[in-house]
Amino acid sequence: MSDSLNFSYLVDGENFASAGQASVQVKKELRQLGIAPETIRRVSIAMYEGEINMVIHAGGGVAQVNVDDLGIEIILKDEGPGIANIEQAMQEGFSTAPDNVRSLGFGAGMGLPNMKRYTDDIQIDSTVGVGTTITMRVNF
Amino acid sequence: MMKINEIIASGKFSAVSVSEPEREIGGIYIGDLLSWVMGRAQADNAWITIMSNINIVAVASLVDAACIILAEGVELDAAVVETAKAKEVNILSTPLPAYEAAMELSNLRK
Ligand SMILES: Nc1ncnc2c1ncn2[C@@H]1O[C@H](COP(=O)(O)OP(=O)(O)OP(=O)(O)O)[C@@H](O)[C@H]1O
Ligand SMILES: [Mg+2]
């Protein structure tokens, strides 16, 4: 689409303290575009969950956000260990998060379920040993 | 309805980082697991937690919470307070446990 807007971010897998910055930045950009607050909230929460997952489980990655006439697309791509059983990973409460991450309040196994809940479409493409690409859409 | 500055005026809650004193609070959510908060808290909630790491600032911002209320006298590192101020995330603290803090807010609302 000719008038689509694209943002991309590098998600640093080393720096846990700054995890989530891309999502906070996207929230700001979308607000400037005058997008409805409820849509922004859904996009930024879903993206944050995916961004945190890339930091915790995959050593970082790349986030891309595309805005077109119909809605917002979020693509999260990493070269981490991959997800062996996607169906299991999507279940509420399933988590492989290590203890140090749990002590920060992560590891409830609710991230992927939240991503599904807050978006209109989610595609998870993952190969063990190669990486994971998650594509989500939120329609206007 | 109640505003953040009204909660502070009650004397049971103190300001840690307040950028929007006039912001109205609609409802309360209590929880420490961040993905639960993101899945269940609603915009304009006061979020009561004992979590103090930097990630609470992003979570509060993304769910559009009216404020974070740190229960049990939990304290924040200076860097977290700085980030909260920069991101205009409102944070209060109270020595009360989460349940009593929520009761107090509920009484104030009357
Ligand atoms: N990008 C990823 N790469 C590899 N594994 C992943 C990735 N994202 C999720 N997973 C796997 O899926 C599981 C479930 O993810 P989910 O986000 O639902 O929960 P969590 O991250 O463990 O905890 P929470 O999100 O509640 O803090 C993870 O524990 C991990 O095993
Ligand atoms: Mg997660």
Image (cartoon, helix red, strand yellow):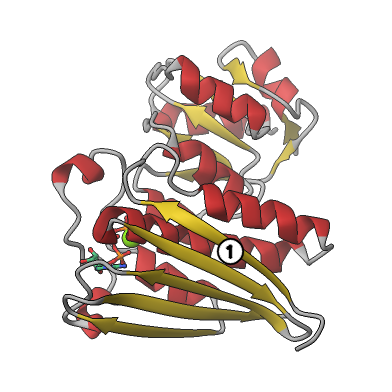
Q: Residues within 10 Å of mark 1 (few under 14, many from 20)?
A: some
Query: Quick one: A97 or A129, which is closer to the camera?
Result: A129
Q: Residue B75 is drawn in which quadrant?
A: top left
Q: Is residue B92 above or below residue A131?
A: above
Residue reaching furthest bottom? A1
Q: Residue at x 22, y 74 (%)?
A: A82
Q: Residue B68 is drawn in which quadrant?
A: top right
The chain that hosts pointer 1 is: A
Q: Is residue A9 above or below residue A103?
A: below
Q: Residue at x 52, y 43 (%)?
A: B58
Residue reaching furthest top? B11
- Quadrant (top left, top right, bottom left, bottom right) of the N terminus of chain B: top right
The spot of residue A60 in percent (x, y) is 35, 57
Looking at the image, can residue B40 be seen? Answer: no
Q: Residue at x 34, y 64 (%)?
A: A110
Query: Quick one: A134 or B103, which is closer to the camera?
Result: A134
- Count the marks: 1
Report whether the residue tagged 1 is closer than 8 Å to ligand 1. no
- Quadrant (top left, top right, bottom left, bottom right) of the C terminus of chain B: top right
The spot of residue A140 in percent (x, y) is 73, 80
Looking at the image, can residue B44 be seen? Answer: yes
Residue pointed to by mark 1: A8
Q: Which amino acid, by three-letter code, is at mark 1?
A: Ser
Query: Quick one: A88 or A1, which is closer to the camera?
Result: A1
The spot of residue A77 in percent (x, y) is 40, 71
Quadrant field for ligand 1: bottom left
Q: Residue at x 20, y 79 (%)?
A: A88
Q: Is residue A6 left or right of residue B102?
A: right
The spot of residue B85 in percent (x, y) is 64, 25
Determine whether the residue tagged by mark 1 lies in a helix, strand or loop: strand
